[in-house]
Image: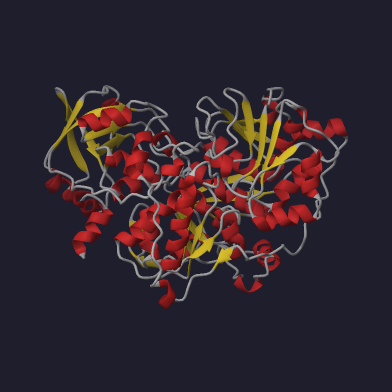
Amino acid sequence: MARTVARKLIDDHLVDGDPVAGEEIALRIDQTLTQDATGTLVMQELEAIGLDRARTDASVQYVDHNLLQADERNAEDHAFLRSAAARYGLWYSKPGNGVSHPTHMQRFGVPGATLVGSDSHTCAAGSLGMLAIGVGGLEVAMAIAGEPLYIRMPQIWGVRLLGELPEWVSAKDVVLEMLRRHGVDGGVDRVIEYHGPGLAGLSAMDRHVIANMGAELGATTTVFPADDAVAAFLRSEGRADAFRPISADPAATYDVTDEIDLSSLEPLIARPSSPGNVVPVRECEGEPVHQVVIGSSANPGLRDYAVAAAMVDGRQTPESVSFDVNPSSREIFSDLTRSGATFRLIAAGARIHQTGCLGCIGMGQAPASGQNSLRTFPRNFPGRSGTADDAVWLCSPETAAASALTGVITDPRAFAREHGLGRPDLRLPERASVNTAMLVAPLPADQAAAVELVRGPNISALPELEPLPDALDLPVVLVLGDDVSTDEISPAGARALPYRSNIPKLADFAFTPVDESYPARARDVGAHAVVGGRNYGQGSSREHAAITPRHLGLAVVIAQSFARIHWQNLVNFGVLPLTADATDLEPIRAGDVLHLRDLHATLPGSARLTVRCGDRAFTATHRLSPRQVETVLAGGRIRQLAQQR
């Protein structure tokens, strides 16, 4: 059978199941990635399941999100993560070493390998021909312990690329075009596989940009072939021996197809406040801009900073614009500085921030209320920036730099015409400035066993979760619309994230971006339900968005559809996710009571349940496998494991 790249990667790691779209399969996992906003729970979960030592080829704990140390909490969590990495045999990437995704690509990426990460943008590693999937922290913990990853076999969506990108159009515009066409749920239950002659003009880091934001399409992951561009990248990183060619067979076919002529693309921008709200930059020209931020895992490559530096060279940003630069890895920052580009950015008025995620997760760089902020980031969900009434736009480095100089949204092609600029001659180095000093290798097993975990007072125990009752009478505490994100369920930012390892305290922030009264009302009623619309739980993989409402009594979520990672996280923590038609959900109001009966007998044998609300009844369905039904009935995966020991 002629196979796609995705199918080859899946077949090579298939442990159980039939790889037919929609069927549950189990995959062997070679590598894991955790970061500090999600890793503390993962380490607590490793402790809860009694792991002795990581059983993967490589597991890496990065510190890249919560770098601001406004009080003791972040520093305490970093000390805990450092001790846990030593105890369980993980690599530890020190604060300031780099954003997890580009750093992992530089130092650990291996074509043909599988990677799971407790960060939704783990899919960026698909740029190297890896099968890289963002999942909840508990699934990463199980992978570290040597267990397979269970997912539903996705459809494989082949996107054929033709032609070459025009001047002032770059990889960010490619993925924004995908979002313009297909929206934030167009990739749900799909692997996006890019192929075709247009790949020849895209570097490995260009592909990283596109693969990274596959998460914004809702895709299970994104894959590219491992070809000459990948070989050149690994060679530049001093890891040429890690290369292995992988390509689709000539006669391979795809479940779904699409085609993009790169030469037809123009600069695009996502308007506030959704990555799917994409329009041409030319339609927004003249909108005032007060902040421009370049960086993040969505535009992490040396080229992305170098092109901005070339555009601002010899020019100055206006006084009304805050021009911020977040280098994505220490290695890239070194090469940027050696080339003189850092000086060009500073001379133009840029503020250089430390290497890390920072503004992307709302940890600093919050914009002024209601003022436009242009960012080369992957997400612009409402309030994610740290400002409740923000106005964040997503764009390429070219559009960002042109707009930073003019003080209004500017098409970089128009800027180039006005100033007589041609395509910048960037002359990037063939060899990267490799420096592994901030990567701490795993301890030998005998030394690791003696390490004690360092716990600050902000690190709580995991909550005790009860089994799912056979009958439920659940007040509806919230009724929500479409595309509710995990940032709205468990907000990021400098106020909430320092409590990420303190579940009772973090629960005080649950759903507060949409209803500040939710935590108090949930505590008052105890067991309760939430009703949502389409694509419920899009965005970040943070399992806090499942565990904190569960801590407050959330038992059931009924929505029209779910984002993949959050749906799995709800299952992992014993919350029953159900779907129903819009016509059945529309009449439900906050305060209504939902009645479910005979769950222990019904769930294992049927995907359909009867839900009563007042004097009417409607049918809800679930997509749980028999394995997942057992998990929900047990009260979650950790409780289930405890019962099995």
Q: How many marks?
A: 0
Please state which of residues 25 and 499 is positioned toward the viewer in this rendering.
Answer: 499
Q: Is residue 247 above or below residue 315?
A: below
Picture coordinates of residue 151 (x, y %)?
37, 55
Q: Quadrant of residue 46?
A: bottom left
User: Which image quarter is the C terminus in?
Assistant: bottom left
> Could one spot residue 25 in this view of the protein?
no
In the image, is 231 to the left or to the right of 85?
A: right
> Could one spot residue 545 in this view of the protein?
yes
In the image, is 98 to the left or to the right of 575?
A: right
Picture coordinates of residue 426 (x, y %)?
80, 51
In the image, is 396 to the left or to the right of 30?
A: right
Picture coordinates of residue 351 (x, y %)?
71, 39
Please state which of residues 102 and 78 is positioned toward the viewer in this rendering.
Answer: 78
| Residue at 17% from the left image edge and 50% from the top image edge | 605
| Residue at 71% from the left image edge and 25% from the top image edge | 285
Picture coordinates of residue 29 (x, y %)?
43, 65
| Residue at 27% from the left image edge and 37% from the top image edge | 552
